[in-house]
Amino acid sequence: MRSLHVDAGRSWRGGQRQVFLLTTSLRARGKEPLVVGVGGSPLLERLQATGIATASVPMRSDWDLRSAKRLRSIIRAWHPDIVHAHDARAHAVALIALAGDTTPLVVTRRVTFPLKSVRVKYGLRVTRFIAISNAVRNAMVRSGVDGQRIEVVHSGVPTPLAPAPRDWRKELGWSRDVVIAGVVGAMTAEKGTDALRHIGAWLTEDTIERTRLVLLGGASRGPIKLGPLRGHQAGFVTEVHNAMAGLDVLWHPASEEGLGTVLIDALALGVPPIAFDVGGVAEIIQNGQNGLLVPLGDVRDFAAAHETMMDAANRERFAREGPSRAAVFSVEAMTEGVERVYQRILTA
């Protein structure tokens, strides 16, 4: 089976990681994937290093006709059984490229934002949609997409390895008594960075004194102060799992989240998470068992959840339950789910 995957991402984020994991897993299972992406992107560079076939197309806008023409040439030369678009721009470009072509088109949707151009982009030319969570599927249905055309396949991650967990206390000269709360990912408002100082405002003085933040992501580096909270911004970290394994608790104050694969990594590493109950987050975290869920935007409750995590016994109890939950969201399960979608299309 030949599958042609299209991703317009120019940076390395969760969506690109999922394309990488899916296509390398498909190849390991004897399938033949080809990935079309933006030239010089981290996704193509990493795939090329593994020997996966790639091709580059600029995809400068959603309706980039020149890129669509280039993609059309690749499709006609390679004759894939399935074309699979992995983001909104790739979706639009693939629609144009496949005009008049009968090759099945699969589109993955990763976010819970309301859909735009539903009649144009989400019409019958898309053979099947894959939603990465039930929350994403429900958002698509609310926007007018027929639920019968949407399959839910949760994102998957490999079991993270952390052979050398970072000792943040030693590295940054912090007391052994402090509790280290980490935030991982793009340091954007949508990921909740604006909420951090507000959460700190509801913590007790003793907890503020005994808490340190570590921000893993973004471009900035060095000491940071967010409201009353002190901490360190580590910037983009290559060995992110070693960095995460050195945390005591993961803060995930995102205001929008299709699923949240960083939460799966945290559970697997035994780092209990606190997160706003948004999007597909509750499909990962079992509240009170392996982490704590807080109503969206309730920074006071988020602070109260962190007060609970200040007790080492509570952290250890949540941490014990994490790995078994994380194992549900494996790369193997994700790949098998996508393959089932492909096979249902091809045998219909």
Image: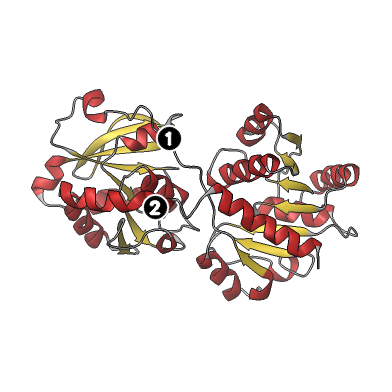
SS type, badge 1: loop
Numbered mark located on residue 139 in the image = none
Label 2 or label 1, whichever comes before in sequence order: 1
Evaluate whether residue 286 shows in this view: yes
Instruction: Give x and y (percent) for residue 324.
Output: 39, 52
Residue at 43% from the left image edge and 42% from the top image edge: 185
Q: Which residue bears the numbered disc 1? A: 161
Compared to residue 187, the image places residue 40 above or below, namely above
Q: Amino acid at mark 2?
A: Ser
Relative placement, left or right, of 144 versus 124 is: left
Q: Which of the pair 330/173 is nearer the observer?
A: 330
Q: Of residues 51 and 184, which is closer to you in this image?
A: 51
Residue drawn 17% across the image and 53% down it:
307
Calculate the distance from the C-alpha at mark 2 to the C-alpha at mark 1: 15 Å
Q: Residue at x 45, y 58 (%)?
A: 256
In the rendered view, does 109 fall on the left or right side of 253? right
Image quadrant in which you'd find residue 179: top left
> Which mark, residue 324?
2
Q: Quadrant of residue 340?
A: bottom right
From the viewer's perspective, tell me whether residue 40 is left or right of residue 206: right
Which quadrant holds the C terminus?
bottom right
Q: Amino acid at mark 1?
A: Leu
Residue 126 seen: no
* Residue 305, image x, y percentages: 22, 57
Q: Secondary structure at mark 2?
A: helix
Badge 1 crowding class, 10 Å Cα cut-off, few under 14, some 14 to 19, many 20 or more, is: some
Side of 34 relative to 238 (left or right) = right
